[in-house]
Amino acid sequence: HRNVRFQKLIGTSVSFLNAYIENRQGQLYTRTHYDPNMPRYTLPYVTGHTKSSYSDWLFFALIRAICYCTLVDDFQQERVYLELTYLINGYSVLFVETHVKRFFNHFSSETMRFSYNQNSYDQFRQQWFKFIEQRHELAQQLQKLDDTNCLFQFHYIYDFGPKCRFNRDFRQLWHHYFQQHPTLSEEKCKIILNAKNFHSLNTLLGMDKP
């Protein structure tokens, strides 16, 4: 396409999307990269339940940071940048603390948040690589179930209340009525429950006019 421009070059480093990759005397060095022409400390535009979406985005942005950053110093710098981004955009300290702790508590590594020990960081990083591999394997399994019509996804409106209890009660009822069914029993199929939130003002403003 005429609007897509490519630049050919030979060197020891390259920036691709949000990754900076460099060959440092035979050692691979990577970190997150931001386009200098783009504004800093901004959050992506989302529709729907913004608080839930930005909670997930922070979690996955931290995963991206630990996958991209080979050095603990770069990771900690990116973590601070993400925290400041949320604070600048009006999110509370409690919101940021809660979701950053969620990331580090995933593998019971609370001390890694402020640690600059490279060996500990390498071990923590490997745990996340294994986690991502498991997620990919699970996605492939779900795709196989979907291809054979054995994957059922249900969406329900959620405003407030105990979602976990609703999901548990739903699965108990499903098991009660379909445990002997040749195709709908839990042994034969996979059930995924997804909560849909009421439209927020952000969603309504983002809708296209008819």
Image (tube, helix red, strand yellow):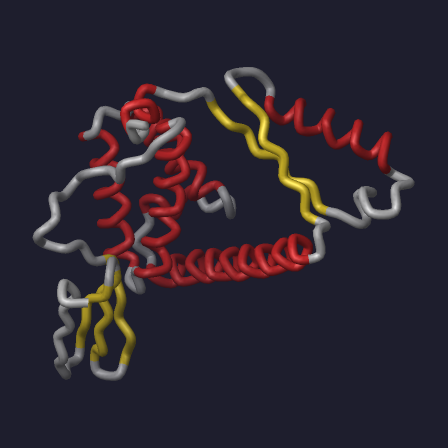
Q: Residue furthest front?
A: 210
> Residue 191: x, y in percent?
69, 41
Number of numbered discs visible in the structure rendering: 0
> Residue 66: x, y in percent?
36, 55
Seen at 72% across and 27% down, the residue is 170
> Residue 114: x, y in percent?
32, 45
Identify which residue, 147 or 50, lies in the foreground: 147
Seen at 57% across and 34% down, the residue is 194
Image quadrant in which you'd find residue 27:
bottom left
Seen at 23% across and 78% down, the residue is 23
Seen at 60% across and 60% down, the residue is 140
Q: Is residue 157 left or right of residue 70?
A: right
Above or below, comparing residue 205 to residue 153 in the picture: above
Viewport quadrant of the C terminus = top left
> Residue 176: x, y in percent?
86, 30
Viewport quadrant of the N terminus = bottom left
Q: Is residue 70 left or right of residue 107?
A: left
Q: Residue furthest left?
A: 37
Q: Is residue 141 left or right of residue 50?
A: right
